[in-house]
Amino acid sequence: MSTAGQMTDSGSGQDGGQTPDGGAEIGEVCIANISPYERRKRLVSGVILFVTGFVILGALMAAGVNRWWRLPLLLLFWSAASGVFQWLDKT
């Protein structure tokens, strides 16, 4: 009989922190599917796109152009973020 705060699972055969085969807990594993050279290219391109986007944004703001002209920069920043996140996730 279980009490409040304790729950028993008689059918699973698993103890709290162990794997089904009785080994230790498995940590998160990420295996890169691209080479370090390709990861570096994605990081460099992401950083270059971020810098380029901020330079263009600064020029547009300094020139005082309409806000709607800044909207296409969304694509530039989105591409930059994609490159950096792919570098971080090793994909």
Image (cartoon, rainbow, N blue to C red):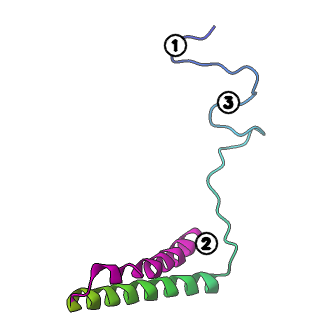
Does 7 sit above or below residue 20?
above
Magenta span has 83? yes
Give the mark, 1 or 2, whose residue is nearer the N terminus.
1
Residue 85 location in percent, x, y? 52, 71
Magenta span has 88? yes
Residue 8 location in percent, x, y? 65, 19
Residue 26 location in percent, x, y? 66, 48
Q: Judge from the rendering whether residue 32 lies leftward or rightward of residue 53; answer left or right.
A: right
Quadrant the C terminus occupies: bottom right
User: Of residues 27 and 41, which is closer to you in this image?
Assistant: 41
Measure how far apart labels 1 and 2 are at the Cα level. 44 Å
Give the residue type that dot 3 points to. Answer: Asp
- Disc 1 designates what residue? 4
In this view, the mark in front (3 or 1): 1
User: Of residues 47 and 59, which is closer to you in this image?
Assistant: 59
Does 5 sit above or below residue 26?
above
> In percent of the image, x 21 and y 87: which residue is there?
64
Give the residue type that dot 1 points to. Answer: Ala
Residue at the top extreme of this rendering:
1
- Disc 3 designates what residue? 15
> In percent of the image, x 68 and y 78: which residue is there?
34
> In percent of the image, x 51 and y 87: which residue is there?
45
Give the mark, 3 or 1, whose residue is nearer the N terminus.
1
Region rendered in magenta: 64-91
- Disc 2 designates what residue? 90
**Residue density around tag 3, few if under 14, some if 14–19, many if 20 or more, within 10 Å:** few
Q: Are marks 1 and 2 in contact (CB under 8 Å)?
A: no
Give the residue type that dot 2 points to. Answer: Lys
